[in-house]
Amino acid sequence: MKKIIFLIFISVLSLTALPVCASSDQIPPVLKNGFDSYQKEGAKAAIEAWTKGSGVEGSREALSQANNFKQIEDFYGKYIGYELVEQNSISERSSVCLIDIFFEKGNVFSKFFLYKKPDGQIVVTTFNFHTNAEAIWPKCSIFQNEK
């Protein structure tokens, strides 16, 4: 009986720790805003939207990622969309989202770390982009049968 109560408690506790990244088919608003900005205004607007309210907002390092996107666009063409591949809660306040970004001639793999601030706002604390998934994604996310 104690085992059953313990399992129920753990199940309920694990459900309450997931709000930073919602369901697997729903991208967090801060990321969606960035991709919407990218579609409408370009890479710099996307970086600004992704970093808004975070500790890296306005930093030269974060904004320099816009130049990387311009180089990617030189090879892969125009940005056309994205797909949320995976999202995982790390703790009650932090999570990670893996997103495949689509261009006309290829794709770019991305990893976003998110943090839920004390006021409830979810911000991006770190992000990485690479044309090689193995450079930034966990192996188990690329090769589903390998753990």
Image (cartoon, helix red, strand yellow):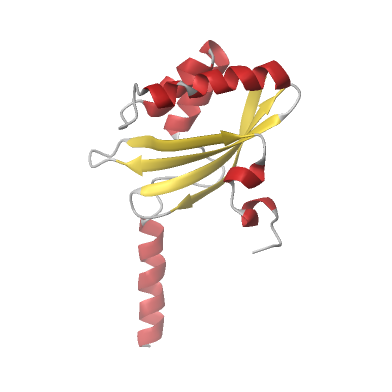
**Residue 37 in sight from this viewpoint:** no
Q: Is residue 117 left or right of residue 112?
A: left
| Residue 53 against residue 3 in the figure, above or below | above
| Residue 19 against residue 129 in the figure, above or below | below
Quadrant (top left, top right, bottom left, bottom right) of the C terminus: bottom right
Quadrant (top left, top right, bottom left, bottom right) of the N terminus: bottom left
Identified at 32% across, 42% down, the residue is: 116
Q: Which is more toward the observer, 49 or 26?
A: 49
**Residue 95 x/y as whole percent:** 43, 48
**Residue 50 x/y as whole percent:** 43, 27
**Residue 96 x/y as whole percent:** 47, 46
How many circles with numbers are drawn on the protein?
0
Of all residues shown, which one is farthest toward the left? 119
Q: Is residue 25 left or right of residue 44?
A: right
| Residue 139 against residue 32 in the figure, above or below | below
**Residue 125 in sight from this viewpoint:** yes
Q: Is residue 51 left or right of residue 46?
A: left
Of all residues shown, which one is farthest toward the right? 105
Q: Quadrant of residue 83?
A: top right
Identified at 34% across, 21% down, the residue is: 58
Identified at 70% across, 55% down, the residue is: 143
